[in-house]
């Protein structure tokens, strides 16, 4: 039976959650709450790999340089340094626990190169790297006698006493309301891609951790920066399946309906430009031609394609396509949120006793745009550091230190007379008005609509079902994203304003955070 009062509580079961659990388990009982099966979440969906400076000719300094360049001027340099300098040792530890990455015939790691990396530094396990890492960590956590898990438990709110986090309220598998208390609580709930109609994220990625933390008074930051992956499978009736950047790293080309490689028209780096630029290049080509865009591997060895990318090949086959022989129709989809619950370099949020790590958190390590394959490394490095800090917090409260500027966010008076919001309406609004290309008119309309939705929620009791909790999270996170995007009157990284198309370091060369009034 899971402990009723564990020392440590973790909400989530991805790479950050499991790495933190392993760090904590020798100190006290750890309880994991996950709203689906333990294998769900974005970690298992990560295809491309995990980046770390472990190859010959690579260094943490070079990895830092590439990360800062991709972050488009807004990375927290200290966070980046922690990531790249801790990364190699944390990856070595992962391999010692049993993670098997692809190797060359001579036994050396088979490192891949992805967009905006200057060298080959991405470790991978075919095209199911996230599943391999998650499986390795889960095998080690499930074998530990002091780590326990409750599946299908939907966290709904942070439990607070005197401004301190003391646990969470949740709905158990039967739908009954429960509360679990702990000395330190970690949010490792993953991303929020489901706020968009078109996304590569699984259904569980609905931004719950961001919403709960914000409602508990925690600072959130950088939510205007959303990464849209350029190559999601675009076949009517099929899921928006991610086609990994590793495909382009191995030579796949983006082509238009005439078979012409077009990315060089928009970006000097062509197909291997940063994701935000490739996504906008695709959108521009779609507008220019009025015809679909494709990813082509037809010029590559078919056996190599099927051998290196079996999972992607199987998904394409289910859609009636041969990855190696057919042009694969693609278009951008929401993939990763650079912002989230603001933390220091050890996972501490602005609410004492509450921590965050992984995609739900915002350390500033990604700046305005995440470098490919840094996300799994972030979960590994900062999950471990959060676990270590939680041990300290179990006995003492340590102040968090932040670098983003706090902005005021006045609330409109509550008027709950508007129509009842729906999940479909929220996701469609985000895709149309807070998507890949934004402008003042669309963002203002989105903010007004979300204000009405927030007021509708505020006039009603806390969520009593999983569906109500999902809707509340989408409304809260979507509204925060829309407000942040409206404030930032420039274009940078994953945030592009057609009415302010240039980067403006003088007026906007800083990160922004806000907290609930």
Image (spheres, rainbow, N blue to C red):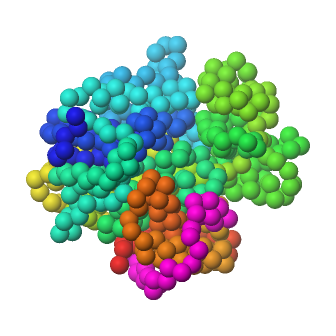
Task: Please tell me which residue is depicted at 47% across the width and 77% down the height of the picture.
Answer: 455
Q: Position of residue 305 (x, y in %)?
A: 68, 24
- The picture places residue 454, in percent across and down from the top left corner, at 48, 73
> Which quadrant of the figure contains the N terminus?
top left
The front one of 502 and 279 is 279
Tell me the quarter of the picture where residue 117 sits: top right
Locate residue 345: give its quadrant. Answer: bottom left
Question: In the image, what residue occupies the spot 32% across and 54% down?
Answer: 177
Which residues fall within the magenta stretch?
Answer: 406-432
In this rendered view, identify the residue nearer to me: 204 or 61.
204
Q: Is residue 425 magenta?
A: yes
State the residue in front, 356 or 344: 356
Q: Is residue 3 visible?
A: yes
Please count the marks in the image: 0
| Residue 389 seen in the current view | no
Q: Does residue 180 appear left or right of residue 78 in this picture?
A: left
8 displayed left or right of 321: left
The residue under the point 35% across, 31% down is 137
Percent x, y for residue 230?
66, 48
Q: Position of residue 315 (x, y in %)?
A: 66, 31
Judge whether 345 appears above or below 134 on screen.
below
Image quarter (top left, top right, bottom left or bottom right) of the C terminus: bottom left
Q: Residue furthest bottom?
A: 413
Residue that extends furthest to the top in the rendered view of this protein: 105
Q: Is residue 30 left or right of residue 248?
A: left
Name the outermost residue toward the left. 395
Is the residue 399 above or below the residue 333 in the image? below
Figure check: 517 above or below 8 = below
Q: Quadrant of residue 30?
A: top left
């Amino acid at each position: 039976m899971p402990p009723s009062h564990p020392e440590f509580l973790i909400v989530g079961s991805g790479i950050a959650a499991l790495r933190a659990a392993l760090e904590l388990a020798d100190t006290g009982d750890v309880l994991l709450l996950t709203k689906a099966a333990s294998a769900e979440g974005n970690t298992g969906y990560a295809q491309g790999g995990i980046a770390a400076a472990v190859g010959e000719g690579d260094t943490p300094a070079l990895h830092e340089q590439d990360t800062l360049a991709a972050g488009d001027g807004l990375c927290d340099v200290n966070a980046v340094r922690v990531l790249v300098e801790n990364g190699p040792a944390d990856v070595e530890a992962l391999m010692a626990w049993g993670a098997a990455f692809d190797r060359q015939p001579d036994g050396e790691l088979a490192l891949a190169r992805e967009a905006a990396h200057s060298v080959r530094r991405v470790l991978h396990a075919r095209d199911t790297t996230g599943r391999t890492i998650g499986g390795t960590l889960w095998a080690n956590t499930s074998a530990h006698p002091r780590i326990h898990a409750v599946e299908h438990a939907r966290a709904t709110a942070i439990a607070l006493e005197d401004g301190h986090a003391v646990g969470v309220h949740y709905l158990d598998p039967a739908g009954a309301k429960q509360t679990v208390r702990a000395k330190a609580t970690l949010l490792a709930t993953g991303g929020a891609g489901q706020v968009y109609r078109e996304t590569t994220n699984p259904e569980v990625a609905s931004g719950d951790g961001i919403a709960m933390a914000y409602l508990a008074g925690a600072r959130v930051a950088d939510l205007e920066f959303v990464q849209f992956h350029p190559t999601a499978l675009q076949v009517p009736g099929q899921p928006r399946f991610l086609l990994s950047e590793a495909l382009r790293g191995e030579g796949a080309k983006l082509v238009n309906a005439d078979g012409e490689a077009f990315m060089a028209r928009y970006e000097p780096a062509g197909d291997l430009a940063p994701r935000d630029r490739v996504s906008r290049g695709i959108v521009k080509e779609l507008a220019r031609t009025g015809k679909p865009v494709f990813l082509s591997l037809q010029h590559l060895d078919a056996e190599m394609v099927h051998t290196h990318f079996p999972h992607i090949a199987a998904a394409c086959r289910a859609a009636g396509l041969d990855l190696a022989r057919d042009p694969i129709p693609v278009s951008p989809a929401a993939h990763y949120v650079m912002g989230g619950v603001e933390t220091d370099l050890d996972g501490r949020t602005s609410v004492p006793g509450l921590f965050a790590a992984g995609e739900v958190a915002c350390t500033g390590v990604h700046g305005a745009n995440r470098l490919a394959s840094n996300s799994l490394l972030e979960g590994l490095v900062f999950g471990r550091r959060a676990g270590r800090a939680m041990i300290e917090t179990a006995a003492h409260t340590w102040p968090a230190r932040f670098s983003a500027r706090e902005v005021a966010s006045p609330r409109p008076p509550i008027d709950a007379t508007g129509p009842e919001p729906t999940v479909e309406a929220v996701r469609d609004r985000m895709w149309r008005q807070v998507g890949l290309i934004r402008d003042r008119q669309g963002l203002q309309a989105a903010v007004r609509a979300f204000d009405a939705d927030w007021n509708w929620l505020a006039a009603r009791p806390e969520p009593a079902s999983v569906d109500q909790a999902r809707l509340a999270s989408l409304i809260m996170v979507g509204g925060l994203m829309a407000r942040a995007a409206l404030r930032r009157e420039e274009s940078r990284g994953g945030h592009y304003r057609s009415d302010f198309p240039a980067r403006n370091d003088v007026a906007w060369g800083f990160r922004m955070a806000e907290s609930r009034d």
